[in-house]
Image (tube, rainbow, N blue to C red):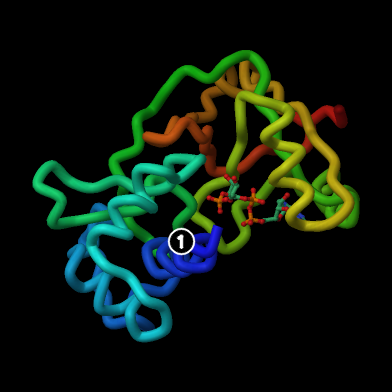
Amino acid sequence: MSHIKTSRLISYILRHNPGAYGVSLDEHGWASVEELISGVNRSRHLTRELLEYIVSSDEKGRYAFNEDKTKIRANQGHSVDVDVELEECEPPKILYHGTATKHAQSIEEKGLIPGRRLYVHLSADAEAALKVGARHGEPMVYRVDAEAMSASGYIFFRSENGVWLTKAVPPHFLIRE
Ligand code: HQG
């Protein structure tokens, strides 16, 4: 349980602010494991062993090592402009997006926008979407007509850890659950 804060810091560094911890990402989002460990150690204790445990036990599969475990990256969720070689995929007919009721008016006007991240995050599972929504306030879930979007030429990606990503969702593809 005490590793949650360390995992959050790892996410923050690998997705949003590597520079603040002396870490650099290559164009595919990879950081050197050594650099990451030293960076995290500026504010929390992290060993290679603990990092391996955090990566393998992460319930969302947020991180990946390269083959020889010298590099690590976040599988999705970046605001830093990197290309994590996402796989373009035909989406299921319906995807879900969880948000907070306070965003509903704006979402129904403008559609889903990525905000500070590179993509809008969607899930194949309404339950998972509800949990994501609850992080922002009183949760609510939108169904996304991914089949119609795909037929209209919108592109979807599926991250290594099963999150669905797309650039934006116009309001007419959204239905409140
Ligand atoms: C909202 C977690 C107003 C959007 C999850 C969300 C996810 C709008 C917030 C991943 C809007 C952005 C991403 C509009 C969208 N007007 N608000 N037009 N369009 N929004 O945190 O999707 O646990 O950047 O509904 O599992 O909540 O971190 O995105 O409420 O996969 O690994 O703007 O983060 O993964 O919030 O979460 P976020 P998100 P981790």
Quarter of the rendering occupied by the N terminus: bottom right
Sort mark 1 into few (<14), some (14-19) or many (20+) by Cα contacts within 10 Å.
Answer: some
Q: Is residue 67 visible?
A: yes
Judging from the image, what secondary structure is the residue with disc 1 in? helix
When asked about the image quadrant of residue 130, the answer is top right
- Decide: is 75 above or below 73: above
Left or right: 108 in relation to 48: right
Rendered residue at 17%/69% (across/down): 34
When asked about the image quadrant of residue 124, the answer is top right
Instruction: From the top left corner, tell me how far across and down residue 31 is, in percent.
Output: 23, 63
- Decide: is 152 above or below 71: above
Rendered residue at 35%/37% (across/down): 86
Question: Which amino acid, mark 1?
Answer: Ser
Rendered residue at 18%/64% (across/down): 32
Q: Quick one: 48 or 171, which is closer to the camera?
A: 48
Instruction: From the top left corner, tell me how far across and down residue 13 is, in percent.
Output: 40, 69
- Decide: is 164 above or below 72: above
Rendered residue at 30%/45% (across/down): 64
Left or right: 167 in relation to 74: right
Quarter of the rendering occupied by the C terminus: top right
Judging by the rendered image, the residue that carries numbered circle 1 is 7
Instruction: From the top left corner, tell me how far across and down residue 101 is, in percent.
Output: 89, 50
Q: Quick one: 15 or 34, which is closer to the camera?
A: 34
Left or right: 71 in relation to 131: left
Left or right: 99 in relation to 26: right
Q: Quick one: 10 or 23, which is closer to the camera?
A: 10
